Image: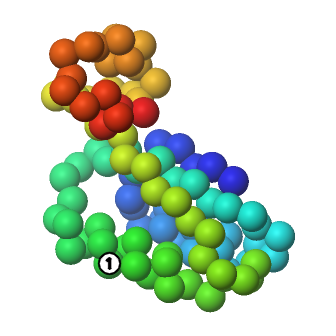
Amino acid sequence: MAFRDFHGDESEFAFLMFIAENAQVLEKMNIVLEFRKPYKPEELASKMMALDNARWASGSKKVGYKFSQLGEGGGSVWNHRLAFDFNCNDPFLYL
């Protein structure tokens, strides 16, 4: 199961926790994080740790995280202009 455009809101984390704790046949959960506002690293880490430490209904933890970088103007991670921007030193910062 993949979750894209995840913004880190409390309701989104609550939904992910519900899925983790109740989906008995879940094989893997991939989350693409796209933040609208800057987060403190400690705040983000505590949310991810809570999901990592959840009581997974399907057994062990099966979550993966990816971060999307939107650039200075914001916008969508599916922006073609950003996808073809070859000025970036590390192309893997973009999804």
Question: Which quarter of the figure has residue 83?
Answer: top left
Choose between 44 and 91: the one closer to the eye: 91
Can residue 26 be seen here? The reply is: yes
**Up/down of 45 relative to 36, above or below:** below
Q: Residue furthest front?
A: 89
Q: Position of residue 55 (x, y in %)?
A: 62, 88
Quadrant placement of the C terminus: top left
Q: Residue furthest right?
A: 25
**Up/down of 69 relative to 18, above or below:** above
Choose between 93 and 5: the one closer to the eye: 93
Q: Secondary structure at mark 1?
A: helix
Can residue 6 be seen here? The reply is: no
Residue at the disc numbered 1: 46
Residue at x 60% of width, y 77% of height: 61
Residue at x 48% of width, y 68% of height: 13
Q: Is residue 45 left or right of residue 32?
A: left
Q: Position of residue 46 (x, y in %)?
A: 32, 78
- Callout 1 crowding tier (Cα within 10 Å): few <14, some 14–19, many ≥20: few
Residue at x 69% of width, y 54% of height: 1
**Up/down of 15 relative to 35, above or below:** below
Badge 1 amino acid: Ser
Residue at x 36% of width, y 40% of height: 68
Q: Position of residue 79 (x, y in %)?
A: 40, 19
- How is the protein colored in the picture? rainbow
Q: Position of residue 19 (x, y in %)?
A: 67, 70
**Up/down of 74 relative to 26, above or below:** above
